[in-house]
Image (cartoon, helix red, strand yellow):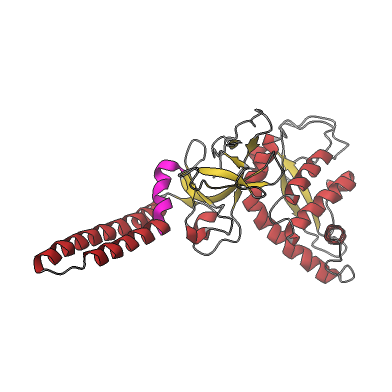
Amino acid sequence: MSDTAVHFSDLDATEQGVKGVETGFDATDLFVFLGERASAWKECANLNVQLLRALCQLSIGDPQKAKIGFTSLEIVHAISKIRGRPWSDAKDKERMSDDVRQQWNKLQKTWESKGEGIGQQFSDAGLSYIPLLKKIEGGGTGNLTLHRIEWVLPDVARPPTELTIAAPASSDGPTTIRYVCEDIQEANPFARIFTRGYFLVGWRKHLYIAVLAVPLILLWLMLVQVTFGITWSYVVGTRNVLSSLFSLGVMYWAFWACLGPLYKLGTDKIVIAPWWMQSTEEDRLLERRAPPRHSEKSIKAVRYVATCPLCGGKVFATKGRWEFLGRIVGRCEETPVEHVFSFDHVTRNGRNLR
């Protein structure tokens, strides 16, 4: 455990640490808050997220043991309780350990995609610390592998490539919302290029420019060819003008549908992701990040979600449609037509547009 990692359940703590640890702080509220957030995730029914929820429940029930960690057997029982039916095999220690290990590895991958959003939610709630996953390998006979959640300061937990500036939550009333940034999940092979962030440095930057420049040059050559063909058709007396224009229009439409959002990133900074990386909800966005808000220039595939203050449903940042043409708005999954909110990816605030 790092010097700045803190277990608030440690009742023996008598001094304030160098990073501002609050003496005698009760971690129960932190575990409750994290458990509630995980329960609201789209992936909450997945076993790896249920493992996280199980750790939160175990930590709430036994604060003293939370600072040491919980065994695979304890986690299996807790997950079974969450699911309402048995999971794994508590009588087979080897299988049980393998099952927990597999879900722990999956949880770590999920945690990487949720880390930024988790930090934003804790910051918005006025909580000074954010959680980190910790696993202590047993390594010998009688030494069991332990799993726990540590609490650290945001500046310690934040990767060096991410520097976000979170604005304080708005308090204008019940018709305002607060977005949280999340990475996209289950992306196809092409979309994975942007899921971890495509950094615009070195050869990557030149490749990105080439991907945008080459189609433009080809389309310009096609336009010249079609223009020449139309002119020639009048000279020789043929009449294939409409078919030539139709073919050119189809090519331009296909080009814009596939790469148009990448061109708009230069001016809009955040756009709806193209169809080839979308989900069924069309809630995936491409965000262009740059200093000073972020440490490096990159393009990242993300999704922004919030809780609807009107009905408690999930709000997704998505297309504005005809009513809000050209805008990204937040739509409630329960009432997508009436519960509509503005979207600002910098402040992460939104207001009711109705």
Q: Which residue is drawn at 47% across and 38% down?
A: 291
Residue 110 lies, in percent from the top left, at 66, 55
Q: Is the residue 353 above or below the residue 150 in the image? A: above
In screen coordinates, is 273 left or right of 231? right
Q: Is the residue 161 above or below the residue 190 in the image? A: above
In screen coordinates, is 152 left or right of 226? right
Q: How many labels does the image show?
A: 0
Residue 311 lies, in percent from the top left, at 71, 43
Q: Is the residue 71 above or below the residue 305 in the image? A: below
In screen coordinates, is 194 left or right of 29? left
The front one of 189 and 261 is 261
The front one of 89 and 229 is 229
Judge whether residue 271 is colored magenta.
Answer: no
How would you classify the magenta stretch by its main secondary structure? Answer: helix
The front one of 5 and 167 is 167
Farthest left residue in view: 235
Q: Which residue is drawn at 30% across and 56% down?
A: 216
In screen coordinates, is 211 left or right of 19? left
Judge whether residue 261 is colored magenta.
Answer: yes
Residue 319 lies, in percent from the top left, at 52, 48
Could you say which quadrant of the image residue 222 lies in? bottom left
Q: Is the residue 296 above or below the residue 102 in the image? A: above
Could you say which quadrant of the image residue 353 lies in? top right
The C terminus: image quadrant: top right
Q: Is residue 42 at all visible to an observer of this figure?
A: yes
Q: Is residue 8 at all visible to an observer of this figure?
A: no
Q: Residue at x 79, y 31 (%)?
A: 22
Where are the magenta residues, as a range? Answer: 258-269
Residue 70 lies, in percent from the top left, at 84, 54
The front one of 189 and 205 is 189
Farthest top residue in view: 172
